[in-house]
Amino acid sequence: MRRLVLLVPLGIVVLFSIASGAEALRRAVVAPQVELQPGVVQLRERATIAVSGIHARSVEVLLAGATNALGNQPATQLPWAPLHLVGGAWRGTLPAPALRGVYPIMLRTGAAATPVRSAQLFLRVFDPGTATQPSFADPVDVVRWWVRTDRHATLVAIKSWPRPGFDLRDMRLHRLFVVAYSPPGHPQVSDRTGMFVTAVRDGYGGRWRLLEATLEP
């Protein structure tokens, strides 16, 4: 996979806005910059992070909503990861979430400090081609598009589905639906097929795209 440096939504260095958060971190920061490489990874791949402009004794990073639990296991948020000061920047490797999706990046200067985040800084865990899929203002339209173009089928029903217990991803960025459709040339009720379709939003206020379609939620 081609290695990229993060933009908004994808590209180079991102200025990390800290309009709110811990007073200690506000005092410690002078025009900080956050760099991800790459800004988009596939499942089980890892990205590196470099944070400059923070003057503190320690810096930690968290991928909000990222877990390492699947199936019926209880969801466990991946822990804060310490960064290390190297060449004037705080550097480290981000953990690998168990699920595809968009993960807000949070920073803090210690266990007692209030975490802060940017509204535009995310790690994206996508299959190749996800970012180039058609996008829609309504996540339901993602499901309709998938049934029409991927299955070449006739839509029967769409229903929003509650997320499983192992899924802690931000619900403002991810929507899960169950869909029923009739395969081409098979309009009989007995031939209908069901799938779970997850739509993902490329940042808060962004448009929705297909993240994945699975037999189980």
Image (cartoon, grey):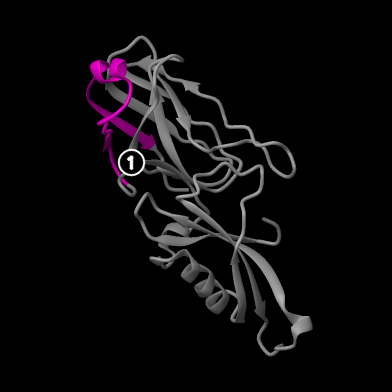
Give the amino acid at mark 1: Ala
- Magenta-highlighted residues: 11-36
**174 to the left or right of 190:** left
Q: Is residue 28 left or right of residue 171?
A: left
Q: Quadrant of residue 5?
A: top left
At label 1, counting other C-alpha atoms closer than 10 Å, the crowd grade (few under 14, some 14-19, many 20 or more) is: some
Residue extending furthest left? 31
Magenta span contains residue 75: no
Give yes or no for residue 24 being in the magenta stretch: yes
Q: Residue 45 lies in what quarter of the image?
A: top right
Residue 24 pos. (x, y %):
30, 15
Q: Which residue is mark 1?
A: 119
Residue at position x 53%, y 77% in the image: 149
Seen from the viewer's position, the closer of residues 19 and 208 is: 19
As rendered, which of 149 and 48 lies closer to the eye? 149
Q: Secondary structure at mark 1?
A: strand
Q: Position of residue 130 (x, y in %)?
A: 47, 58
**Does 98 appear above or below 57?**
below
x%, y% of residue 68? 63, 35
What residue occupies the far top of the structure in this picture? 57
Identify the residue shown where x is 60% and y is 67%.
159
| Picture quarter with the C terminus | bottom right
- Say how many tags the image has: 1
Residue 65 lies left or right of residue 180; in this view the side is left
What residue is shown at x 66% (from left), y 43% (from top)? 165
Looking at the image, residue 55 lies above or below residue 67: above
